[in-house]
Amino acid sequence: MGSAVEPGRAGAVPSILLGLAIILIMAKLGGELFERIGQPSILGELLTGIVLGNVHLLGINVFDFLREDTTFTVLAEVGVVLLLFEVGLETNVKEMLGLGVTATLVALVGVVVPSVLGLGVSALFHPGESFYTHLFVGTILCATSVGITARVFKDLGALRRRESKIILGAAVIDDVLGLLVLTTVTAVIGAAGAGRGVNVLDLAVILGKALAFLFVSIIVGLWLSPRLFKLATKLRSRGLLMTRSLAFCFFLAYVANRVGLAPIVGAFTAGLILEDVHYRDLARRENADLHQLLQPITALLLPIFFVLMGMRVDVRDFANFSGLAFALAITGAAILGKQACSLVAKGDNVDQTLVGLGMIPRGEVGLIFAGIGVTLFLGWKPVISQQILSASVLMVMITTLVAPPVLKWRIERILLRKTPASGEDNFPLFP
């Protein structure tokens, strides 16, 4: 009687298990180290990947299989889908629509200006690359990861300040705009790679498809979601909240991919649709919280993504002047581009500089965009080269590192000022 498992795959399972053990242990150690010095754990996980991916330069090749086995890549991509699902869950559609003119303008400027600067820097340093490469570099820079900023404001007891609300609101809109830009640019590059030209009408169709998917999914989903969960409450099985939610997320991610959009767009939309009120009865019956249920899964899968992204960095790209100069120039464009947000952050007692500084971090969103760029090809050549990918990862690390100290510095400066009329702090530490 033959084995039910192919011999090749049966032999691969132990190496996959060993790889998972290595990634998770090393990622946790790296994350713990950075958290102890007051920095996000994502930086430790990225640095872990950079070390594992470059020890072969010292003649140590035992970790090469982590990069070569596609199983880890698949697990990382599932982790990214779940991350965008979580981002969507934390976003309220009604609140997003009521964020106001200021947050919307900040988001628009925060997408457009860094994108243009990134495109220009890429064209300056890599004139031999395709225009589509420069365009995608600009797309990577448009992302904003506001988690770092929110943590700093929370630590200082300033989440209720107007600056905080503007930044958080703008980041929500920024996520949506960034995904729309990513979808459009990805579709344009896909058409170019297939030898088809793209005109203004094609761009309108691509953007219209993305907007139609968002709006139709949200409208249908808001009607369908509560009914599905109400039906689930009639079933006796356990774990229905988790399985129904994940199935909804994966299904919309699949549908998004089928209509030509990135799966993360569908996952984000699924999170937007699912509101607490839809599954409140089911959560009460199971005595469970969806965010808490997702945490163990993302804690398993996301470190794989961050470590693999770090492993894609070749430190030799920074050994020559041109490679290091490009990485620093991209980082400068990423930081300066978000400072343009301060120009439109109007309002009483709003510190415009603080708003610009709060939009700096790229974090996991920038990494996701860069990772997608590696999978896109123009003919036989990837849109994002090895050097550009390495520079993008360094940019994410620097913007994530620099944000907390500069935000604390600015808040401390504001605390020293007094409102003339009342003599009270213009930015109280504990409002």
Image (cartoon, helix red, strand yellow):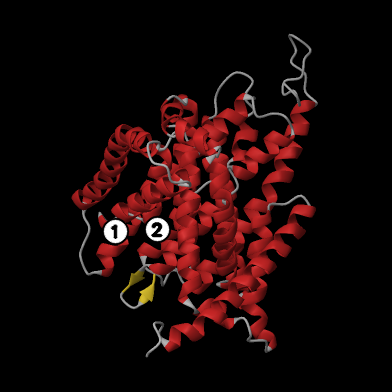
- Label 2 element class: helix
Residue placed under numbered mark 1 in the picture: 188
Left or right for 355, reference 133 = right
Amino acid type at mark 1: Val
Q: Residue at x 29, y 58 (%)?
A: 188
| Residue 126 percent location from the top left of the image | 46, 69
Q: Is residue 306 visible?
A: yes
Give the camera-side residue of 111 and 148.
148
Amino acid type at mark 2: Leu
Contact check, label 2 and label 1, Cβ < 8 Å: yes
Position of residue 120 relative to residue 157, above or below, is below
Taking the view exactly as shown, the residue that stands out farthest to the top is 421
Q: Residue at x 64, y 57 (%)?
A: 42
Give the camera-side residue of 251 and 84.
251
Is tag 2's residue or tag 1's residue first in the polypeptide sequence? 2
Residues packed near mark 2 inside 10 Å, few (<14), some (14 to 19) or many (20 plus)? many
Left or right for 200, reference 307 = left
Residue placed under numbered mark 2 in the picture: 135
Q: Is residue 124 visible?
A: no
Give the camera-side residue of 59 and 290.
290
Residues packed near mark 1 inside 10 Å, few (<14), some (14 to 19) or many (20 plus)? many
User: In the rendering, which numbered label is found on residue 333?
Assistant: none
